[in-house]
Image (cartoon, coloured by chain):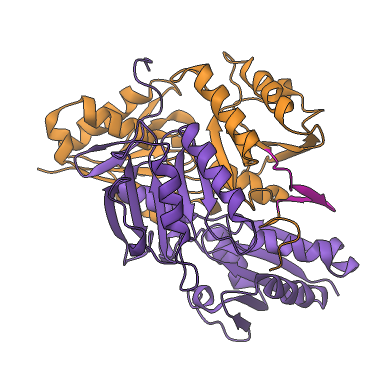
Chain colours: A purple, B orange
Amino acid sequence: MTGSLVVVGTGPGKPELMTPAARMALAKATDLVGYGLYLDRVAVRHGQCRHASGNRAELERARLALALAASGRDVVLVSGGDPGVFAMAAAVFEAVETGEPAWRSLDIRVEPGVTAMLAAAAEVGAPLGGDFCAISLSDNLKAWATIERRLQAAAEADFVIALYNPASSARRRQLAQAFDILRAAKTGATPVLFVRAAGTSEAKVTATTLANADASTADMRTLIIVGASTTRRIGRWIYTPRGEQGMSS
Amino acid sequence: MTGSLVVVGTGPGKPELMTPAARMALAKATDLVGYGLYLDRVAVRHGQCRHASGNRAELERARLALALAASGRDVVLVSGGDPGVFAMAAAVFEAVETGEPAWRSLDIRVEPGVTAMLAAAAEVGAPLGGDFCAISLSDNLKAWATIERRLQAAAEADFVIALYNPASSARRRQLAQAFDILRAAKTGATPVLFVRAAGTSEAKVTATTLANADASTADMRTLIIVGASTTRRIGRWIYTPRGEQGMSS
């Protein structure tokens, strides 16, 4: 009896931003495992078991999904956005590495999805139009010094910077500290975007500058984009040109 | 008479990785503009005009799409992957900025999609599981010195690095030079992934190390992922843990 595990990205929230491949995987599963908020995006199907959990405890959730698959079930682990970007796929392979030897031979597949920064960028134009980086501001699993070093490097190299997990009810200092680090290396006029609930029907964009950015307005549903030196506003859009000024296309 | 322009990402190639939102936009368009290879992914629809073009000349393509929209047509500009990541969305806003004043008041929308690095990552596990950056190695529009500086910063800050546009028939040196820069700052055992045609039925993965990576095997359909110091192999998968060793979850 061989089960399977598909780690699925449901995209940013709107049903029409979930890929058909993700939808097909969900339809075929005997068991769905996931954070309650993400499971709620999936239509209930008769005979399909749903294992909802809280937002934390990602490793436990991954282990439950693996154990169910090892017992012969066809499991979908439901993740938001893209499962490979600050989401459940890495937790699954951590659980495989540290878990039952039999889990290493399981049939595991990852289905990509639209991650939050892509949905956020699309709401405002094309701010990720040049080279960019994505940094999670959560220091639950990595040292703040590591995050600080990456923010400094990103500013010095003039990447567009997407900040995931800027704040939660328990983490309130990180974004303000990140803005301070970036202000030391970048001009105050740098465009900063707060995109809340990107890719959902409640999407809300606040466009400001690094000088004026107010960290207290972000929450766990906010994705922040800090522009590069070339990022600019044109009408109601914000975009980063593909190249550098003076280079012809 | 008011037209519209939707810049659509068709995803990496497989139809089931194109979002329903993209498909709906395509179905409603009177005119499709795009690089021939991407237009070929879209089913022909009676009465819909198709304007195919070559791969270069992105600004011209953007201008054609804007001019058609300004003339009252409902245009979809068809891009691969996600249109905001090294694709057509930035070119559209560049064209708006430098083009007809009337284009600034056009109804323009961007539909996000699954960009190549997400599809490539899903093929191999979760290599983008930590902080990461995306760098285009094309120096057609930016100085090589800028790319070099970003590669160095990315290596020093220990980002996972996704390399877009590693090579084309005309550009053969860049990837080898990039590997040389990274070899100076990272250990030779760093995992390097060559993922060709990710998210298509012809996807092919080559997993190697920075010491052994052979730049000559990449072409314009290859996406390269260079691991962080924590990126590791477990069975047939490659992944980057969410955090740093010794931090509990």
Q: Nearer the viewer, residue A7 or A190?
A: A190
- Whether residue B111 appears in this view of the structure is no
Residue at 48%, 17% in the rendered image = B143
- Whether residue A173 appears in this view of the structure is yes
Assign the C terminus of chain A to one quadrant of the image: top left
Q: Tell which residue pokes out farthest to the left in this image.
A: B1
Q: Position of residue B94 (x, y in %)?
A: 29, 29
Q: Nearer the viewer, residue A226 or B27?
A: A226
Q: Position of residue B246 (x, y in %)?
A: 75, 60
Q: Position of residue A82 (x, y in %)?
A: 55, 57
Q: Quadrant of residue A22?
A: bottom right
Residue B227 forms part of the magenta stretch: yes
Residue B111 forms part of the magenta stretch: no
Assign the N terminus of chain A to one quadrant of the image: bottom right
Question: Could you tell whether A87 is left or right of A237 in the image?
Answer: right
Magenta span: B226-240
Residue at 36%, 48% in the rendered image = A122
Question: Could you tell whether B88 is left or right of B37 in the image?
Answer: left
Q: Quadrant of residue A202?
A: bottom left
Number of residue marks: 0
Q: Nearer the viewer, residue A68 or B37?
A: A68
